[in-house]
Amino acid sequence: EWNVILAIDSSRLARDTDLAGVISYEVRKAGARVEYSKMPSGGNAAMDVLVAGVMRAIDAFHSMISKEKALAGMRTNVRLGHRAGGRAPLGYVLQHTPTGAIRQGMPVQKSKLIADPVWAAKVKRYLKLRASGNARHEAARATGLTVKNVTTLIGMERNSLVYAGITVWNRHAENGAQRYRPRDEWVLQRGTHDAFITEAEAEALMAHAMPRSERRTRCASGDFLLSGFLSTPDGAKLVASGDGYYRAGKGRRIPAEALEAVVRDQMNEEVDSHEFTQRFIAGLKRAADELPTEPTALAAERRAVAGKIANLLKLAEKSPDSASVAARLHELEQEQRQLDEQIANAERAAATRRALHATTGEQAEGMLAQWIAEDGSTIEEQRAALAQMVDRIEFDPATGRGRIHYRIGLDGGRFDVETASAALGLKKPGFKWRPHGDSNPGYRRERAMS
């Protein structure tokens, strides 16, 4: 029910000429008008339209000039070894340093990355394992990063140049189909902070993790679904041989499509059984019993640290230039942040423990069904979904028999590739396996996984 919208000038509505035109049209369509204190109406409607058009162009001009100056300042910051904004990636924290300048009554500060005492060692080991060829889920499990979402791990690998001690700027695209700008437009400043990995390792990680404009398909390179899960009874890894087969060393080659189809079919049959669901619930409860209890001791320690900080702040008011007081205060604040994180983790673990103990059969079936159906458009994303449920798959190429070892200590029944392939209608490698049909309760999940 408004009749008029008041603004200081036209730039307060929009500095984009197209957007300003849309707003003006919507206001006029609603039967209202816009008036400006610095640009009053002259009473001539035609002249007002002309003035408004000119002012919109001036607003857009000032916006573009301001943007260019801001980007130039960011570029200079990066060249001087500072960060151009943004939060610290996992494994680092920001260290702020005053420049001596004052802006709007506040000291101007520049930031750089320093190693995070909580996460640095884990992140460094994870990246080293990934650079040496370990699967993502294996590296995360070995370093304790399974608490992080798989998208966080992928983001770390895409940001691996930062973990090589390089400040990277102008990497993300503003708009369009591509998320990243061309590599030659990136601004790189080396040696700005402590490196976790070498630049060569970072480039290798990025080559695998960065998104591609075209969809990746399975080809002779052998980027297969079960890579990283398969091993022989004596512990040897089965890897892609480069021609559509899995192979351990120079041993027998196993058709990739046949083995993957059999494993999917085996998972569908096992997950659909009542016995497996009950074993799964028992495994959840065993895992819950291993989680820590609520952090009463941590909370007491946290209160003690808070008391020390309060006392130091009073002392700092009396001696504002004391370097020793400032250093001790920084140590206590860092200790307080670590305790806060430990308390939050323990509280989450306690909540998880209670939820796992209360899991019903219907909830367990829903979890299992979601895990099987949660596949992505790429093999890498499908592997990440599979890793939520499967720990490893033991397979003997000599006999063609194997067993799926699920997470939370569950072992599946044994399967035989040759027998199962015949039942699925796989006559030769590359032949599309045939689902069992609507009568099979796992058919819909099989179709989703395939």
Image (cartoon, rainbow, N blue to C red):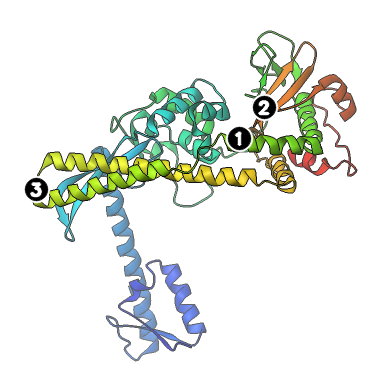
Q: Residue at x 33, y 42 (%)?
A: 301
Q: Could you tell me how far apart the alpha carbons at marks 1 and 3 are, in whole angstroms?
A: 52 Å
Query: Considering depth in this image, is 307 or 382 the residue closer to the camera?
Result: 307
Q: Could you tell me how far apart the alpha carbons at marks 2 and 1 are, in whole angstroms?
A: 30 Å
Q: Residue at x 41, y 40 (%)?
A: 342
Q: Which residue is mark 3?
A: 319
Q: Would you call the spot at circle 3 few (<14 residues within 10 Å), some (14-19), or many (20 or more)? A: few
Q: Position of residue 358 (x, y in %)?
A: 65, 47
Q: Is residue 394 left or right of residue 332?
A: right
* Amino acid type of the residue tagged 2 in the rendering: Phe
Q: Position of residue 174 (x, y in %)?
A: 44, 51
Q: Could you tell me how far apart the alpha carbons at marks 3 and 2 are, in whole angstroms?
A: 64 Å
Q: Earlier in the sequence, mark 2 or mark 1?
A: 2
Q: Is residue 414 above or below residue 308?
A: above
Q: Which mark is residue 224?
A: 2
- Is residue 427 at all visible to an observer of this figure? no
Q: Is residue 283 above or below residue 104?
A: above
- Of labels 3 and 2, the one closer to you: 3
Q: Residue at x 35, y 69 (%)?
A: 57
Q: Which residue is mark 1?
A: 287
* Amino acid type of the residue tagged 3 in the rendering: Ser
Q: Is residue 112 left or right of residue 313?
A: right
Q: Answer yes or no: do the residues labelled 1 and 3 have beta carbons within 8 Å?
A: no
